[in-house]
Image (tube, grey):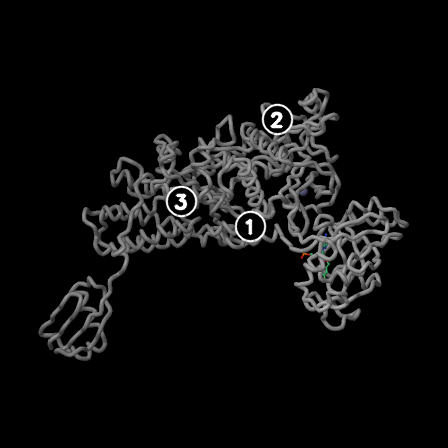
């Protein structure tokens, strides 16, 4: 073996050997206990990986190696989320076909990942754009269609003028702009496919409580996104004989309602015969250009139009109330209509002031004047007929019952807008027939292959580029045989990622998304690692999984019982790493300069796993030196253990085991740094002790440890399939005792020392004590040492 640590001489070599030996192959032996370690899979962008990306991949690599050394049959796969706008936009910009771009980018990602020596079994790779994969995405869509969970809608949806497609709410930033291109998103009525995720809202919410191993913050984000609100639905009749429901959380304030508001998009608005139709239509048109954020922002000047010639009846007291449309009422929340109570709701209060509407107190809270703001708290009812004197809480239900309303919950979560007017996605497997309506493509005709097109750029017309391929679009109706047309919208990027984790366990199955035996063996995922996506992918996948549970495809109610949240790596300048800022650090270059092992160690050492931390290339100098120090120790190996290292070694086994298990990789590394420093100071290191240390290091620096393990220590099989070391609890505690120091029979000091302290050390320590020094001024005549107890000087 070469004297100097030279990563270039060993890394490629061992990667090849591991591959030939197949040490990372997933076993089909289901009698062995399994462990499934999953990363949120990447979409293979054209920019390749920067050093921020592999942090999670290295963490799962460490963790899965650790589990393999514990004897588990480990599934730690990698694959590609390759449909969707990012891949398509890249392809358009670079004028290559999306498929070609994906192939190229996947190859590049694999090459970059391979450099760091991951333990993937590539036989389990999946790619969402592979027809054998998306056949099952389409199959699941059809199952949802069968169950009435996939439906067509003509409601106004988010339209991104930049990406030229409809988007789901989850695709928008908090400020209402497009997550992909930052365009201001408009509302546009168009035909689209929608998944009824709201049917699962209650279960998605309730089952969060079954996930103790999820970060609290992610669960809270999901709770807010689902946004359950408990209230009442109450029917108001109109003077025109029509009626509508309002949703209110404050039925106790019904007697204080002084007007009602319909969302401008409310279906009744078009139907009602009113006197100011033109004015109303103009307002509706104006509102359609506004973002939801603009409409609902607090303190924003209220706007609206009164519907002339119509009144509503308050069901509690039969009072006639004016009817308005106003943009602060949203079409997609509750029932899209509210009873307005200016005395007790701030937005209603602002509106009432502007439009000179009466303000009527119905919950006691002192005087309300036009200058004070609404009293939004609970209290005792006033001006409320028979209900006067009740508390708000009591009155909510009583008043709801009195007006034949219904106690009901509503959710912020909307159904999932599931079609995109773009090329690069799974075709939606539906055929439109004039006779039969929307007809599912028969299961035995799946997959519906995404055809090649001349131009895959968005048409901007609200039609996908697929609409232009006549020979593909025109088909016979599977039901009646008459001429019909294929659905030309495609699925959103989130489709494949909603179930890909199932396919990893059975990637080549032609007969099912996943074989049920394999599903029972491998699922659920034991640990899922990734950042972001708290409310997007992680809600969609939970929804999808629950649906698959309901149709008996999967056994568990939750796909990911343990979620480890990954912090970002920022650039050295503290900004996001991005081409735009020119601050990207390339992992290939880091591996080239410092070696893959130093790179891996640094990524794990950089800080607490869930924290966002800045990159520092200088840090790799340190981890490289650490490896060199480990490497040097092999020159002073001896057959016998060095007892002085035992405590430290066993403490390290314990700490590294605990820390890897709980994703505290940085502190595991620092503990190993302490141990190697001790070894470095010691005269000798026992062969066995060194071997144990290498095993602890192996998940972090697989190449260097393997080189020493096999060559210096002459093992015939890989360190990566060796058995994880156990620690001896008794050796992890440093036994300390109180040692008494006497001078001429008198106690002059009591010192705390290691139990196994040697005579020389004990005497030296005793003589160093100040009080002892006072009494031992000359060379003592006699020194008595009782191990573990006493040093006695006779002077
Ligand atoms: C009357 C009322 C009186 C209300 C009062 C509040 C206070 P959360 O808690 O967020 O669910 N609301 C209902 N549907 C709406 C819509 N589509 N757009 C805008 N606002 C809507 O909010 C529930 C309250 O928000 C409802 O209760 C309703 O106003 C309003 F003193 O009804 B409330
Ligand atoms: Zn966009």
Q: Is residue 135 above or below residue 644?
A: above
Task: Decide which of 171, 150 is in the foreground and name it.
Answer: 150
Residue located beneath label 2 in the image: 448
Q: Position of residue 221 (x, y in %)?
A: 58, 52
Q: Position of residue 603 (x, y in %)?
A: 44, 48
* Callout in the foreground (2, 3): 2
The CA distance from mark 3 to mark 1 is: 33 Å
The kind of secondary structure element at disc 3 is helix
Q: Position of residue 388 (x, y in %)?
A: 73, 67
Q: Is residue 198 left or right of residue 161?
A: left
The kind of secondary structure element at disc 2 is loop
Q: Is residue 720 above or below residue 405?
A: above
Q: Is label 2 in contact with label 3 (beta carbons under 8 Å)?
A: no
Q: Is residue 172 left or right of residue 51?
A: right
Specify the quadrant that holds the C terminus: bottom left
Q: Residue at x 65, y 28 (%)?
A: 440
- Based on the displayed image, in which of its 4 quarters is residue 735 positioned? bottom left
The CA distance from mark 2 to mark 1 is: 36 Å
Please say whether residue 94 is visible from this viewpoint: no
Residue located beneath label 3 in the image: 62
Q: Is residue 705 left or right of residue 162?
A: left
Q: Is residue 8 left or right of residue 99?
A: left
The picture quadrant for ligand 2 comes to top right
Q: Is residue 401 above or below residue 691?
A: below
Q: Residue at x 78, y 61 (%)?
A: 257
Specify the quadrant that holds the N terminus: top left
Residue located beneath label 1 in the image: 206
Q: Residue at x 19, y 72 (%)?
A: 740
- Based on the displayed image, in which of its 4 quarters is residue 3 positioned? top left
Count neighbours of disc 3 (C-alpha within 10 A) and say few if under 14, some if 14 to 19, many if 20 or more: many
Count neighbours of disc 1 (C-alpha within 10 A) and say few if under 14, some if 14 to 19, many if 20 or more: few
């Amino acid at each position: 073996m070469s004297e100097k640590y030279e990563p270039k001489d060993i890394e490629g070599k061992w990667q090849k050997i591991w591959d030939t030996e197949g040490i990372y192959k997933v076993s089909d032996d289901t009698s062995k206990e399994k462990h499934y370690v999953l990363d949120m899979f990447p979409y293979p962008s054209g920019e390749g990986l920067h050093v921020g990306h592999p942090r999670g991949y290295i963490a799962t690599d460490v963790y899965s190696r650790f589990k393999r050394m514990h004897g588990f049959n480990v599934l730690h796969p990698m694959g590609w989320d390759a449909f969707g706008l990012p891949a398509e936009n890249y392809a358009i910009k670079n004028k290559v076909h999306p498929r070609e771009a994906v192939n190229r980018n996947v190859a590049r990602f694999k090459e970059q990942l391979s450099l760091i020596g991951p333990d993937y079994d590539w036989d389990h790779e999946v790619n969402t754009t592979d027809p054998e994969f998306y056949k099952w995405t389409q199959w699941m869509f059809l199952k949802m269609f069968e169950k009435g969970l996939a439906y067509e809608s003509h409601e106004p949806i988010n339209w991104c003028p930049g990406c030229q497609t409809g988007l789901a709410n989850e695709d928008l930033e908090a400020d209402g702009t497009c997550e992909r291109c930052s365009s201001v998103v408009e509302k546009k009525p168009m035909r689209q496919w929608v998944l009824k995720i709201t049917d699962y809202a209650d279960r998605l919410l309730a089952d969060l409580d079954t996930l103790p191993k999820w970060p609290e913050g992610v669960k809270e984000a999901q709770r807010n996104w689902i946004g359950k609100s408990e209230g009442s639905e109450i029917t108001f009749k109109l003077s025109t004989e029509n009626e509508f429901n309002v949703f209110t959380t404050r039925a106790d304030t019904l007697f204080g309602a002084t007007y009602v508001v319909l969302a401008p998009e409310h279906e009744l608005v078009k139907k009602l015969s009113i006197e100011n139709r033109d004015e109303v239509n103009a307002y509706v048109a104006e509102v359609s250009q506004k973002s939801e954020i603009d409409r609902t922002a607090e303190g924003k000047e209220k706007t609206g139009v009164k519907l002339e010639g119509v009144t509503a009846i308050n069901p509690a007291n039969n009072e006639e109330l004016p009817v308005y449309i106003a943009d602060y009422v949203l079409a997609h929340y509750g029932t899209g209509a509210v009873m307005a109570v200016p005395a007790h709701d701030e937005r209603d209060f602002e509106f009432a002031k502007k439009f000179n509407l009466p303000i009527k107190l119905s919950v006691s809270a002192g005087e309300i004047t036009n200058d004070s703001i609404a009293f939004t708290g609970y209290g005792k009812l006033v001006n409320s007929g028979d209900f006067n004197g009740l508390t708000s809480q009591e009155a909510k239900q009583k008043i709801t019952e009195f007006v034949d309303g219904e106690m009901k919950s509503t959710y912020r979560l909307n159904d999932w807008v599931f079609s995109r007017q773009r090329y690069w996605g799974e075709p939606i497997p539906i055929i439109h027939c004039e006779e039969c309506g929307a007809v599912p493509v028969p299961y035995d005709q799946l997959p519906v292959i995404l055809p090649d097109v001349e131009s895959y750029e968005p048409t901007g017309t609200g039609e996908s580029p697929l609409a232009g391929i006549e020979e593909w679009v025109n088909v016979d109706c599977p039901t009646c045989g008459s001429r019909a047309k294929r659905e030309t919208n495609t699925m959103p990027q989130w489709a494949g990622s909603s179930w890909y984790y199932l396919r990893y366990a059975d990637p080549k199955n032609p007969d099912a998304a996943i074989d049920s035996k394999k599903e029972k063996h491998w699922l659920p995922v034991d640990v899922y690692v990734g950042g972001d996506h708290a409310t997007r992918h992680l809600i969609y996948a939970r929804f999808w999984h629950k649906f698959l549970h309901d149709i008996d495809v999967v056994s568990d109610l939750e796909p990911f019982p343990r979620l480890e949240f990954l912090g970002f790596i920022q650039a050295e300048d503290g900004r996001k790493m991005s081409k735009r800022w020119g601050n990207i650090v390339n992992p290939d270059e880091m591996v080239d300069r410092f070696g893959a092992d130093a790179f891996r160690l640094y990524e794990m050492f950089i800080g607490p796993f869930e924290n966002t931390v800045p990159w520092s290339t200088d840090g790799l100098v340190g981890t490289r030196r650490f490896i060199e120090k480990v490497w040097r120790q092999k020159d002073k190996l001896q057959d016998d253990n060095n007892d002085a290292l035992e405590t430290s070694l066993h403490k390290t086994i314990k700490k590294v085991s605990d820390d890897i298990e709980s994703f505290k990789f940085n502190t595991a590394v620092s503990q190993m740094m302490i141990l190697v420093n001790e070894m470095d100071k010691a005269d000798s290191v026992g062969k066995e002790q060194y071997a144990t240390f290498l095993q602890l290091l192996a998940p972090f620096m697989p190449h260097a440890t393997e080189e020493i393990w096999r060559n210096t220590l002459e093992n015939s099989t890989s360190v990566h399939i060796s058995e994880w070391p156990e620690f001896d609890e008794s050796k992890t505690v440093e036994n300390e005792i109180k040692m008494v120091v006497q001078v001429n029979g008198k106690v002059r000091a009591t010192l705390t020392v290691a139990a196994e302290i040697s005579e020389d050390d004990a005497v030296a320590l005793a003589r160093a004590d100040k009080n002892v020094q006072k009494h031992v001024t000359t060379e003592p005549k006699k020194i008595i040492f009782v191990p573990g107890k006493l040093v006695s000087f006779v002077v």
